[in-house]
Image (cartoon, rainbow, N blue to C red):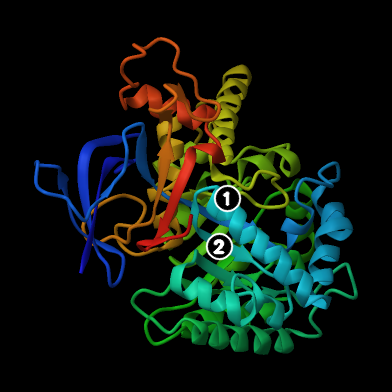
Amino acid sequence: MTLTIRANFVHTPGLGSIQILLDHLIELDSSDGFIVNLGPYGGQDLMDAVQVPEGSFILPTFCDLHLHAPQFLYQGTGLHLPLMEWLNEYAFKAEEKLDADLDLAELVYRRLARRLIESGTGAVSLFGTINEETNLIAFFDCLVLAKVMKEAGLRAFIGKLSMDTSSRPSYVEPSAQASLDSAASFVERCYALDQAKGHRLIEPILTPRFVPTCSNALLQGLGELAAQGKSFAPLRVQSHLPEPEDQVAWVRSTRHAEDIDVFDNHRLLTPRTIQAHCTFLPPPSLDRMSQTGAAVAHCPLSNAYFSSTEIFRLREALNRGVKVGLGSDIAGGYELGIQGVMRMSVAVSRLREGLLKRESQALKDGAVKNPRIDWKESLYLATKGGAEAMGLYRGSGWFNVGAPFDAQQIRFYDQRTGEGVGALDFLDHDDKSQPKLVEDVIEKWWCLGDVRNRVAVWVQGNPLL
């Protein structure tokens, strides 16, 4: 059985390019939600097709490469503190609270899942807590949500935090070995929740929080566990590379090395690794990220709060072939929607361009003369670039035969009222017609759009909204 959708489709096949497929058909295999045919509508009978009305377009869902699920509990608060103080005052307390109250954890994760879908996020890489049981609830919410997520849910990497060192004595694992045993157990139990190897939506991801909370013994063991993997692939890994200046200084003073060296030496820098932030990585370290195949979760909003002395070298990373996607970094970032993160990524890149020009550093330290990115490039990072950085199925993040249908329907114009939807206004067109779907309309939505414009979301062909 197949399902045919007739619509206007928009995607970004490459960095900086956007393609508008007017009045096209996408045909899905109903059994697995993968695209089997794509082409222009040719006038054929479409009695059983889904007809998306004019004034709308279908876009790939967003990928969020970095989100702390338990921190959704206090999203939008506490951002007046520097990172290490903020962790002690807010993050660790919230994570500990959810570990002690599984009913509250279920409530938080249910609401988070709903908000992600409303925001158009179809794939997400999540940091959980140190408690194995709590993390199995995350995005499964006991047996009920486990069934829902398995049948029609988000594409999610679930990470049980590994940390055997902490400034909060009540929130730490008792030893490196205990942490490793818990991580290995979690991996097996998480895989058991979603048995479909080929079309699995839920996967475990090893999650050493960051170097300051992990002993060398723990990192060594996690590197061995990652390499051992499962029969079909090595395990995924996620963590943080230097975000604030005090973290960089702490690692240098205690480990006598850079963060990236510590991860690389313990075999935790691989093609299946996602490292958040990377704000203090100089060009040679970006070269190493490219050589190892590790990806960057660029979190421009939280970086602005916690990495005030450095701005991530995004253009240099892209020029070097580093895989880059975007991350909300809830709750270090207060914006859950990747649409807001896209906007911030462009704004930050323009600020960096101005700083380099002012300081005449455009040719120093391997920097580029034009570090800015534009809205099209940010849309690529949010969709196809993010999917590649996450290591999703080949073809994910754009519309092509063989890719899963992960998509969102955006409505920008209401034919009944003759007005734009949500915050979008179209005041200079003939009222007898509707605005044509051109790049300017997509850019207007990119700048002004919000949840009011999103009327449907699919992940692997399954409707979520």
| Residue occupying the point 36% across, 12% down | 429
In the image, what residue type sits under mark 1?
Gly
**286 w.r.t. 167: above or below:** above
Residue kind at label 2, given as amino acid type: Ser
Residue 33 or 212: which is nearer the viewer?
33
Q: Measuring 37% from the left and 82% from the top, which residue is drawn there?
A: 232
Question: Quick check: 288 above or below 107?
Answer: above
Residue 279: image x %, image y %?
Answer: 62, 45
Residue 210 visible? The answer is no
Q: Picture coordinates of residue 58 (x, y %)?
A: 35, 43
Q: Residues within 10 Å of mark 1 (few under 14, many from 20)?
A: many
Residue 200 in percent (x, y) is at: 41, 75
Q: Nearer the viewer, residue 350 or 313?
A: 350
Q: CA distance from mark 2 to mark 1?
A: 9 Å
- Closer to the camera in the image, 241 or 397: 397
Tag of residue 125: 2
Does residue 411 show up? yes
Residue 45 coordinates in the image, percent (x, y): 11, 49
- How many residues crowd around disc 2 within 10 Å: few (fewer than 14), some, or many (20 or more)? many
Q: Which residue is mark 1?
A: 327
Which residue is located at x 69 percent, y 46 percent?
A: 333
Residue at image position (74%, 48%) is 244
**Secondary structure under the numbered disc 1 in the rendered image:** loop
- The quadrant of the rendering that contains the N terminus is bottom left
Callout 2 touching callout 1 (CB < 8 Å): yes
Q: Secondary structure at mark 2?
A: strand
